[in-house]
Image (cartoon, rainbow, N blue to C red):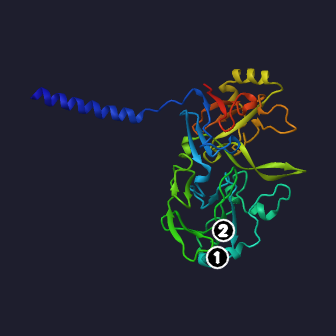
Amino acid sequence: MKYALWLTALVLCFASCDKTKIEDIKVPASTGSTLKVNGIAGSEQGSAAGNSVFIDFSKDKQGTLSRAGWDLAFYCGSDFRVLINNTTAAMAKVINKTDINTVNSSDVAGVSFELDIANPSPEAFAMIDDIDGDLSKTAIPVVSSIEAENKVIVIHRGTAGAVTARDLIKIRVQRNVNGGYTLQYAPIDATTFNTVDIAKDEEYNFKYWSFEQGEVAGEPRKADWDIMWTMAIYKTPLGNDFVAYVFSDLVAINYLNGTMAVEKEYATAAEATTAFNNYTKAMAEAEIFVSERWKIGSRWRKTAAPSVTDPGVIKTRFYIVKDSQGNYYRLKFLSFTSEDGGERGRPELRYELLQ
């Protein structure tokens, strides 16, 4: 009996010690992998891939988010900002009213919720979030602590990438006493509205909301992704200026959580391959990194067009990514479309930890 009690106590002691040790263990960062991006959600064309895909190099993980599966993203940082869905080319029109029940279709009569690349208008630009991700330039103004300053917003939910057109929605957002957001929302011509509170969570950049499903799982925790592959509003040259345009196959970095990148470009694909294979951590430590949202953007690929003779991955470029934990990864894209042996909507890439 004494032996049994002693053995039980010993087992409990080891269990307690092991738990402490497990909690103290830091999982080492992945040394790298070859990964095929899961951009296709169903039977859609690859150029209209239905998923945004978030990739975490250090954990060898990717997670998907349906582009049509969310409408608003509520910032979890110190400011009070709400994003609209630029992956569906959503647009937002501020109405100079504070009573949501008094807003209807007549308030947006004549408003075009379309991006016209041939004839870009200042009004259209005012209805989209800043392309480069500047949170001080969101289409929905900052949510003020003064209630009367928060106007009603009409949301066009976007149709980019074969997303089905949906009815206009009107919203009004306030700060609440718990430090989060209170959202009022309704169809454009409704005379009653729904109300919901949305809490901030410091583990995330944003909390995501769908008008059909309520709060949804959006991007992963901010420490759990480095790059995002998606379709989104981006910019393209028009004359001497740039205009907003919807691009497929864009790559963003997690700039709000400290991820940074640098592009390396060479004269030939052979030189780029040699440089990639020989690139070291010491070289990375000497680089000047930037935290630009679209530092990779569309620059890693060429799409088929009359003026493009070699569509596919641009083999003369690769990227160095520094994640929020200070790990350096060399990143290159391997295939992207049928012209380079890949599949549109499921690009293949390779990343390697520099040690």
Q: Is residue 143 above or below residue 307?
A: below
Residue found at the far left of this picture: 1
Near-viewer residue (304 or 13): 304
Q: Residue at x 55, y 58 (%)?
A: 209
Q: Quadrant of residue 290?
A: top right
- According to the picture, the residue beneath numbered tag 2 turns out to be 154
Look at the numbered disc 1 and give the secondary structure of its residue: loop
Q: Position of residue 213 (x, y in %)?
A: 52, 58
- According to the picture, the residue beneath numbered tag 1 turns out to be 103
Q: Where is residue 82 in the image (x, y as percent from the top left)?
A: 62, 60
Q: Is residue 352 above or below residue 37?
A: above
Residue found at the far front of this picture: 43
| Rendered-image quadrant of the N terminus | top left
Distance in Å between CA atoms under marks 1 and 2:
9 Å
Near-viewer residue (119 or 329): 119
| Rendered-image quadrant of the C terminus | top right
Near-viewer residue (85 or 226): 85
Q: Where is residue 254 in the image (x, y as percent from the top left)?
A: 63, 44
Q: Residue at x 66, y 59 (%)?
A: 165
Q: Earlier in the sequence, mark 1 or mark 2?
A: 1
| Drawn side of residue 168 relative to residue 26, left or right | right
| Drawn side of residue 182 relative to residue 34, left or right | left
Look at the numbered disc 2 and give the secondary structure of its residue: strand
State yes or no: discs 1 and 2 in contact (Cβ < 8 Å): yes
Q: Is residue 147 above or below residue 285?
A: below
Q: Which residue is drawn at 67% across and 53% down?
A: 88
Q: In which quarter of the image is residue 349?
A: top right
Q: How many marks?
A: 2
Q: In which quarter of the image is residue 251?
A: top right
- Amino acid carrying mark 2 in the image: Val
| Drawn side of residue 263 relative to residue 23, left or right | right
- Amino acid carrying mark 1 in the image: Val
